[in-house]
Each structure stands twice: as C-alpha cells, then as structure tokens.
Image (tube, rainbow, N blue to C red):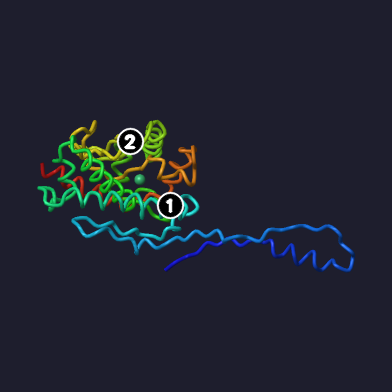
Amino acid sequence: MKKNITRFSILASFFLLFSCNDNNKLTEVVEVPLPTKEEKITIGSPNDVKADPGSFELTKLPFTYDGLSPALRSLTLETHYSKHYLSYTNNLNKEIVSTEFENMPIEDILKKMPLSNLKLRQNAGGYYNHTLYFNILTPKEQTPKDTLAGSINKEFGSFNNLTNQFKGQAEKQFGSGWVWLVVDRYGKLQITTTEDQDNPLMKNALIPGTPILGIDLWEHAYYLDYQNRKGSYIDAFYGHINWEKVNEYYVEALKKVKKV
Ligand code: MN
C-alpha cells in the first residue's frame, strides 16, 4: 500500500482569474512560470521492509507510519524504521555470520561480546535498542497497570515521580544515547542512561539490568519533527508508551531475577 503526499501548484488558478478579466482591459501582464515538477514524498508501508537474509529480522511495527502522528510524523517513523533500524539489523547479520554469535539470542550476544569489537557492539546494540523502542510505542495514550503499576508506586512513590525522573534524565542526556527503565539484578526498577548504541545488558553498564523501556535520544529519532526542541520530543514519546507491553517485559524480567 502506497500513500502519496503530493503538493500541486495553484498557479493555474491565477491564469484563469486574469483571463476572465479580458473585457476590462487588464494591462498588467504577469509571467507565471509553470511548475517544473511536482514535489512528491512517498511514504511506504512498514510491512514491505525486510532485512537481508540472516539471523535477525526486524520486529513488526505494530502500527502504520502515521500511527503516532502528529507526535511523531510518518516521515520520521519511516526514516527511523526503514533506514536506521534496517541498517543496524543488516549490519548485525553481516557481522555475526560464521562467528560464535551467529545462532545466539541477541541478549547473550550483548552480554558476551567484547566491547572492543566496535562494529558488533554498535550494530547489536542498535538492533536490540530499536527493536525494544518500536515494540513499546502505541498510538493511544496509556498509563501503567497491573504488576508494574504497583511496583512503580512502591519504588518511585508515584507514576508522576517516575515520569519526572525519566524525563529529567532524558533532558540531561548529552549527545546521542538512550535513557532506560530497567529491572536490575535485584529485581528493582531503575532509571539509567547509556551512550551511543550501548545498553544496560553490556559489560560497561553503570546499572546493569534488563531494559523494559527505552527512549532513543539520537537526533535522527526526532529532528525532522522537533529540531532542537528535544523536550517536546520526550513529551511526545512519553505520551505514546505502550505500558501494557512494558508490563509484559517487566513480568518476564522479574522471572529471570528470581531464577538466579
Ligand atoms: Mn534510532
């Protein structure tokens, strides 16, 4: 399915206006250049985006590119999903071919890989981070429920406190990186940050843990919509968090903690 956004010139209507006034001896002659070409932006469908054959596939975007509009518009989402995320996925697949990582779950790759392997680190991180990002967004505003809601109230005092702390960390993050809500090794919820495409599963994490929510603070995530207004992007993102999904990740992460 293709959706075309086309801007037509309205110049033709000016010609019409002047030609109707012939009888009034209109002497002004206006040269109006004909449009040389249509400005055309074609937005594709997320379902048409496929990674090259390899170990990892893109997560299916659970809505169309205009699903989060106007908070994040279709061109932003399309570029992010079908260009940036796709590149990380294809590059990750290339990096792990015929290595010990080829058939490993992504979480294990992130925990085991040497941080000195920069290409693998950037692309495995980029793949994991964006998979989570696109999985926890939703068109309609939600608030936390169930197990997660209870834990947020217990550990942060209120959902409002969590919101303020999360947004505050995101505002403070300097340069490209991510802010996370993680379940740490003791099963406690924590907010933490990482640079570039690192994440809290890697060996260098300040607060190691399982991410259940993450905001992409690279400019490519928001610049087309918000330019320098990072705070507006953070608010827009926060209004589209799929807390039901975050709760699912939370419950899964807690199970892993208990096994240790
Ligand atoms: Mn990104």
- The local crowd at label 1, few if under 14, some if 14 to 19, many if 20 or more residues have their Cα within 10 Å, is few
Compared with residue 48, is residue 235 higher up or lower down, i.e. above or below? Answer: above
Most extreme residue toward the right, as rendered? 24
Residue 69 as seen in the image, left or right of residue 215: right
Q: Gap between marks 1 and 2, in whole Å?
A: 21 Å
Closer to the camera in the image, 218 or 182: 218
Going 18% across and 35% down the picture, which residue do you hit? 116
Q: Position of residue 246 (x, y in %)?
A: 30, 49
Residue 23 as seen in the image, left or right of residue 107: right
Q: Quadrant of residue 64?
A: bottom left
Q: Which amino acid does label 2 sit on?
A: Phe
Q: What residue type is labelled 1?
A: Glu
Compared with residue 187, is residue 206 higher up or lower down, i.e. above or below? Answer: above
Closer to the camera in the image, 10 or 109: 10
Residue 96 as seen in the image, left or right of residue 228: left
Circle 2 is placed at which residue position? 156
Disc 1 on helix, strand or loop? Answer: loop
Q: Position of residue 191 (x, y in %)?
A: 30, 36
Q: Which mark is residue 57?
A: none
Circle 1 is placed at which residue position? 141
